[in-house]
Amino acid sequence: MTDPAPDANRKLVSVTLDEASIGRAAPEIEHERQVAIYDLVTDNVFAPAGADNGPFTLRIGLIDRKLALNVGTAGGDDVVTHFLSLTPFLKILKDYFLVCESYYAAIRTSSPSQIEAIDMGRRGLHDEGAQVLVERLAGKIETDHNTARRLFTLIAALSWKG
């Protein structure tokens, strides 16, 4: 994984969700999705392989239990669509959600050191999910670690049942 220098042509300027395939969720889940999108668009490195006509847009949908990443230019031209199986993320997401539940419960009743230990586990799983995403995007979309983490956050928000 590389950490390319920031470049206006290697950025996402918008991320949208395909409501037809993903659908709306409960208000708290919608909020998590919007926060994840905001964080992703605010700071990212994103460049489809062989494309130098950015900045880019990303439309995310679900097709046959696969994540459809439709990349376009800010001017509206289609660039590429990649399909990612969610299977490699399922165990990480399950563990991540369990640790997040423990974290939120710990905030109410546990000591700061216990909360910190649980949070370290949560961050470790988050990093693991980001690494899997980088591996799955290798040769398709170049990104940096922080952008992969933000994309994983969005995948988690799309997968969260509340």
Image: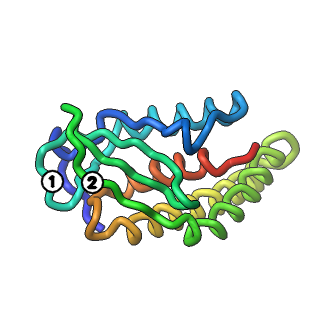
- The numbered disc on residue 29 is none
Callout 2 touching callout 1 (CB < 8 Å): yes
Q: Dot 2, how many residues are within 10 Å of its Cα: few (below 14), some (14-19), or many (20+)? A: some
Residue named by callout 2: 80
Which amino acid type corresponds to the residue marked 2 in the rendered image? Val
Which one is earlier in the sequence, the residue at label 2 or at label 1? Answer: 1
Residue 161 vs residue 149, the one in the foreground = 161
Residue 61 image point, x, y percent: 49, 47
Residue at (76, 58) in percent of width and height = 98
Residue at (39, 65) in percent of width and height = 134
Residue 59 vs residue 41, the one in the foreground = 59
Q: Is residue 86 left or right of residue 147?
A: right
Residue at (50, 54) in percent of width and height = 152
Q: Quadrant of the C terminus?
A: top right
Residue named by callout 1: 51
Q: Is residue 70 above or below residue 55?
A: below
Residue 3 vs residue 156, the one in the foreground = 156
- The chosen color scheme is rainbow
Which amino acid type corresponds to the residue marked 1 in the rendered image? Ala
Residue 102 image point, x, y percent: 79, 53
In whole angstroms, how far apart are the C-alphas of marks 2 and 1? Answer: 9 Å
Q: Is residue 76 above or below residue 120?
A: above
Residue 157 image point, x, y percent: 60, 45
